[in-house]
Image (cartoon, coloured by chain):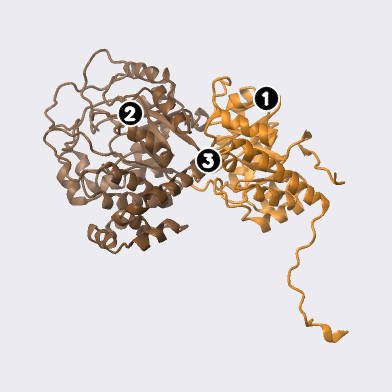
Chain colours: A orange, B brown
Amino acid sequence: MTEAKPDALVIAGRTFRSRLMVGTGKFPSSQALMETLTACDAEIVTVALRRVDLSKPTTDSIMRAIDRERHLLLPNTSGARNADEAVRLARMARAAGLEPWVKLEITPEPRYLIPDPIETLRATERLVAEGFIVLPYMQADPLLAKRLEEAGAATVMPLGAPIGSNRGIKTREMILIIIEQSNIPVVIDAGLGAPSHVAEAMEMGADAVLMNTALADARDHRGMGEAVALAIRAGRLAYLSGLGPVRELAAASSPLTGFLS
Amino acid sequence: MTVRSIKELIESWPAERIIEAFDAVTEERVLVAIGNEQRDVYDLVALLSPKAWPHLERIAMRSQAGTRRYFGRTIGQYAPIYLSNLCAADCIYCGFAAQSGNTERRKTLSMDELEVECKALTSQGLQSLLIVTGEAPKKVDVHRIAEAVRVARRHFPSVSVEIYALDDAGYEVLVEAGVEGVTLYMETYHRPTYQQVHLLGEKTVYDYRLDALTRAGRAGVRRLNLGALLGLYDWRAEVVWAALHAKALQKTCWQSAVSLSFPRLRHTPERFEIPSPVDDRSFVQLMLALRLFLPEVGFNLSTREPPALRDRLIPLGITMMSAGSSTRPGGYASTGEETLQQFALEDTRSPAEVAQAVRRAGYEPVWKDFDEAFHSS
């Protein structure tokens, strides 16, 4: 065994063994979701409040796949177009007996679901003041990340690429700055479409990732769940072990500065 | 592209230009359209062309993969309630038409009757409702419809309407009442045909109807659902125009989700023969072509289509299906009144049976996809 060991993730004082969060919206069945959750060993599972019927946890197809003993059920405000709607959804979830954690998603534009920076910051301030633990989905904007951190967010969740695009980490440069500057966990959310993207996020030093589409759309849910769990472990170990530097240029055979010696 | 009115956009693609574009399609061009990451109108034309027939399977695979990636393996479930079949328009293809010879059996539900209908649907698990009326703005005015929306919201998290075209103030009244979506079909985008088949009432004004969904979006309606009534005019041209309309709405009403329906004329009143019938192969082709052109647009499929075809379309690009529908007022908990229905249904299965078919196809039926918390009132 290597010296470096995958370490725990701590969010708002709570410790998690797994660095994977799973979105639940796109699975073909309750069974497929359960198989994925078991195979990938995720502890944080997010559900869209607009999709679930919190009053019927035993018949709702998403709710019944989630084992509340093993998983933190993280409600999200998907579909909210502004801070008011998001705050109402969060309050409703807490009133229904969920823990006061909320994944804040404010996407006034329904096509690419790009998060609204202004409303997200406003909602974060209000929800933090009401005692919520807030995990905001955000554009990969380093300055916004700092503003959300100052507003009391528990993590920041910058997007790698538009939701559901499976395109990988297209915002890499900005995410590297966010990771470098952040005092709270950075979770790469959206756009990760393959285990290799997940491994890349972890190698970059992200604290966690969130995945839905690639897991939900797999032919073999167990297999993909396990593959993603392995990718997280591989990427995190590589990060902790210290990756070798990437050479920017090939070494020239006749050095340009050779005349100096 | 700079902002143009929908009218200008449609007029920039007259039938002759579309025919020219179709004539220029080669099989090679079809392959380019399939492979492209971003697709333009010429790609859409290629995919709709007979030259695409040998490649339909590849197009279907793209359509399936794209739909699953964006929407997941889920199918939304909804049903309509016909609030009223009163109609002052005369659309010669429609069972509700004022001149269809059916002066009897007209009815508008009272709010009590509406409640009974709502309960009949929710008892079957439905949580998304579409309220439908005929074209009777005087007898069933927007305030009556808004009242119906308020009543229905006690039972359904999501309530949409399919009614006559309104002005800005009318849509604002509906948004205030808590409407999530508006469905409004242009019927035909071909102006001369439009004038030939719409003979009476406000609906005869083509331009007013064409801009209706833009007004709805401006008023804050979250879902805008459009379509052409397939069969009235050449389907390839109608699909191009509907696609242009959808694209324009995505830009102008950027806070609203745009979706498409594919109402196909199958059974019409005796006095009307379908001018351009659409066969199953063409129906599938147009749906697949639209999916490749509009990857983030929801596709609705109604019970106008027969079960065997509906079930096969589930994995090809559909995202919403109605189930257990009735197209007459009081059709779910009827007191025995045989009110006039708008059109005959092909898929008469219950919501539970449709949900079972969805699961058999490897998809999860989604009943709830909206929440009371989105409403400020």
* Left-right relation of B201 to B120: left
- x, y percent for residue B221: 41, 39
Q: Are marks 2 and 3 in contact (CB under 8 Å)?
A: no
Q: Is residue B189 above or below residue A173?
A: above
* Left-right relation of B316 to B133: right
Q: Chain of mark 3?
A: A
Amino acid, disc 3: Arg
In the rendered image, the quadrant that contains the N terminus of chain B is bottom left
Instruction: Give the CA distance from mark 2 to mark 3.
Output: 25 Å
Q: Is residue B172 visible?
A: no
- x, y percent for residue A240: 81, 49
Instruction: Give the CA distance from mark 2 to mark 1.
Output: 43 Å
Quarter holding residue A123: top right
- x, y percent for residue A130: 68, 31
Mark linked to residue A68: 1
Amino acid, disc 1: Arg
Dot 3: what SS?
loop
Q: Furthest residue to the bottom? A: A259
Q: Is residue B326 visible?
A: yes
Are discs 3 and 1 located on one and the same chain? yes
Quarter holding residue A78: top right
Instruction: Give the CA distance from mark 3 to mark 1.
Output: 29 Å
Q: Are marks 2 and 1 in contact (CB under 8 Å)?
A: no
| Residue where numbered disc 2 is placed | B145
Are discs 2 and 1 located on one and the same chain? no
| Residue where numbered disc 3 is placed | A81
Amino acid, disc 2: Ile
Please name the residue shown 32% across and 49% down the image.
B242
- From the viewer's perspective, is the residue at label 3 or at label 1 nearer? 1
